[in-house]
Amino acid sequence: MKKFAPFILIAVAIGIIGYFDSPKFAEKEQAVTTFPVPEEDTTSAISAEEEEIKGIPELENRLVDMYQEDGYSIEVYQEYEVYKDEQGNVIERVATENYNYLRYKL
C-alpha cells in the first residue's frame, strides 16, 4: 500500500486540477463573478451631452497669490479647466480645487 500512495496522491491532484479547468467549473465561476449593471440615470445622460458640446477641457494654471515667507518667495497657482469651441474661442473657464506652490530662495 505504501508503494501506491504517491500514485494515488498524484491521481487525486490531477483530478482536482482537471475539475478546475473544466467548462462546468468556468460556468459556475462566471455566474458568481458577474454583477448586475445598474441602469443609467437621465441626469447622467444630460451631463454627458453637455460634456460632448463643451468638449474635452484643457488644464491651465493661473497665478493666484504671491508672498514672501522665511526668506522664500512663494507663488500660488490654481488649476482651471478651460473649455474651447472648434475655432479655439474660450467658452467657459472653471476653477478646480488643485493648487500648485512654487518656492524660490531670495
Image (cartoon, grey):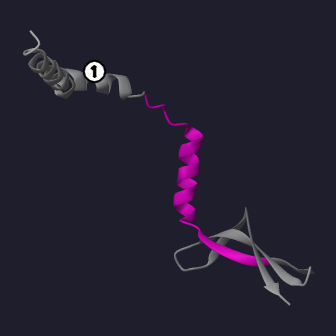
Quadrant of the image occupied by residue 54:
bottom right
Looking at the rendered image, the quarter that the N terminus falls into is top left
The residue sitting at 37% across, 28% down in the picture is: 34
What residue is at 92 percent from the left and 79 percent from the top? Answer: 70
Region of the chain picked out in magenta, as a range: 36-63
- The residue sitting at the front extreme is 2
Is residue 54 one of those drawn in magenta? yes
Residue 22, given in percent of the width and then of the height, sits at: 16, 25
Q: Is residue 95 on the magenta stretch?
A: no
Q: Residue extending furthest top? A: 1
In the picture provided, is 19 more to the left or to the right than 88?
Answer: left
Which quadrant of the structure image shows residue 4?
Answer: top left
Q: Position of residue 71 (x, y in %)?
A: 90, 84
Tell me where residue 44 appears, x and y as whole percent.
56, 44
Q: Nearer the viewer, residue 104 or 1?
A: 1
Rendered view: 43 above or below 56: above
- Asked if residue 47 lies left or right of residue 106, the reply is left
Q: Place residue 3 in its image quadrant.
A: top left
Q: Amino acid at mark 1?
A: Lys
Residue toward you, 14 or 25: 14
Q: Residue at x 54, y 51 (%)?
A: 48
Q: What crowding class fits label 1: few (fewer than 14 Cα within 10 Å), some (14-19), or many (20 or more)?
A: few
**Residue at the spot x=58%, y=67% of the render?**
57
Q: Depth check: 45 or 82 in front? A: 82
Judging by the rendered image, the residue that carries numbered circle 1 is 28
Where disc 1 sits, the SS reads helix
In this rendering, would 105 be left or right of 7? right
Q: Nearer the viewer, residue 101 or 31?
A: 101
50 in relation to 75, above or below: above
